[in-house]
Image (cartoon, rainbow, N blue to C red):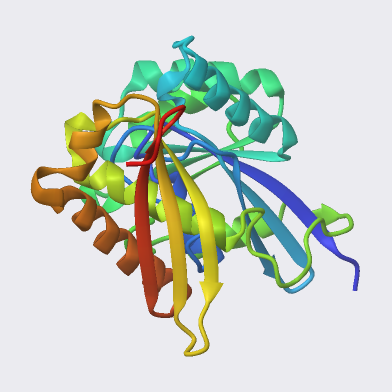
Amino acid sequence: MKKKLLKISLVGKTNAGKSSLINNIIGETVSITNKKINTTEELIEGIKNIEDNQLIFYDTPGLNFAKDVNKKNKKLKKNLWEGLNKSDLIIYIIDISKYNQKESLNYLDKIKELKKQIIVVFNKNDLKEKNFALPIIKTLSNSFKIDSFFSISAKYNLGVDYLTQYILTKTYNAKWIYSNEEISNKDDIFITNECTRNAILNSLHKEIPYNINIINKKYKFLKNGHLKIRQNIEINNSRYKKIILGRNGDKIKEIRINSQNNISKILKTKVHLYLTITILNAKEI
């Protein structure tokens, strides 16, 4: 039986549900979800093999930063367009509960320049009436050449199988890029680092220092099967120290416990996580 392949980029605003959808289709956590803006910074690939078909999904950074020009957003923009250029098919995801017609028209106007097939997916359909999307479909169809429209709820796994089955009809004869066992281009160390970054985003709210890095220093399975992890939280401004530590160390403890629990859930083993805050070009705290 000949192998078939399809590369799909998922694009949309932050919180549209890109990471939730890719995790749902893959059946494992390959991309961290969070309500904060641009939780996904890297170009994360999720791989789903179904019989002789290999589907490669690119979970791209949110489109919110498109007009910004700062250094970080240049990196996000680069990762976004890398995913779009690699793909055969583009899935534009819209949070139907927060639909903005002007924004969608502007984003699709940019995406159409790539001259690739576009599928529009309305996510979070559990939050709207059944026929809410009909006038939107008419407007978008009149303005762009859209291959197909789908309505889903990634959170509740509604309509996702139907979408996946449709995507399978688009595959073409080609060698697989990944082996049958691989589900992502990122390893477990990347995922565990992302869990800690996600825990920081959840715990610090509006005081979030976005320009932080999580660096793995130790990742070792113990004889009893438990996993021991040491990570450095790298910051470049000493004023973030007190924010991350919190009063009497309560914030760093909350971050550690939340990340540890999430890692344990994803990797299905007991985890012992140790965190150290480091200031770049300074001594460890």
Q: Position of residue 265 (x, y in %)?
A: 38, 72
Pick the residue in front: 20 or 139: 20
| In the rendered image, the vertical position of residue 172 relative to residue 241, given as above or below | below
Name the residue furthest bottom: 224
The quarter of the displayed image where residue 174 is located: bottom right
Q: Quadrant of the N terminus?
A: bottom right
Is residue 132 at all visible to an observer of this figure? no
Task: Locate residue 139 relative to residue 189 in the image: left or right.
Answer: left
Task: Locate residue 13 relative to residue 115 in the image: left or right.
Answer: left
Q: Position of residue 193 (x, y in %)?
A: 46, 52
Is residue 220 at all visible to an observer of this figure? yes
| In the rendered image, the vertical position of residue 269 relative to residue 8, given as above or below | below
Identify the residue shown where x is 38% and y is 79%. 270
Q: Position of residue 258 (x, y in %)?
A: 26, 60
| In the rendered image, the vertical position of residue 249 relative to residue 88, given as above or below | below
Number of marks in the image? 0
Pick the residue in front: 230 or 179: 230
Name the residue furthest left: 247
Identify the residue shown where x is 71% and y is 39%. 87
Identify the residue shown where x is 65% and y is 45%. 8
| In the rendered image, the vertical position of residue 14 relative to residue 270, given as above or below | above
Identify the residue shown where x is 83% and y is 53%. 172
Name the residue furthest front: 283
Pick the residue in front: 26 or 226: 226
Pick the residue in front: 103 or 279: 279
Q: Quadrant of the C terminus?
A: top left
Q: Position of residue 77 (x, y in %)?
A: 56, 22
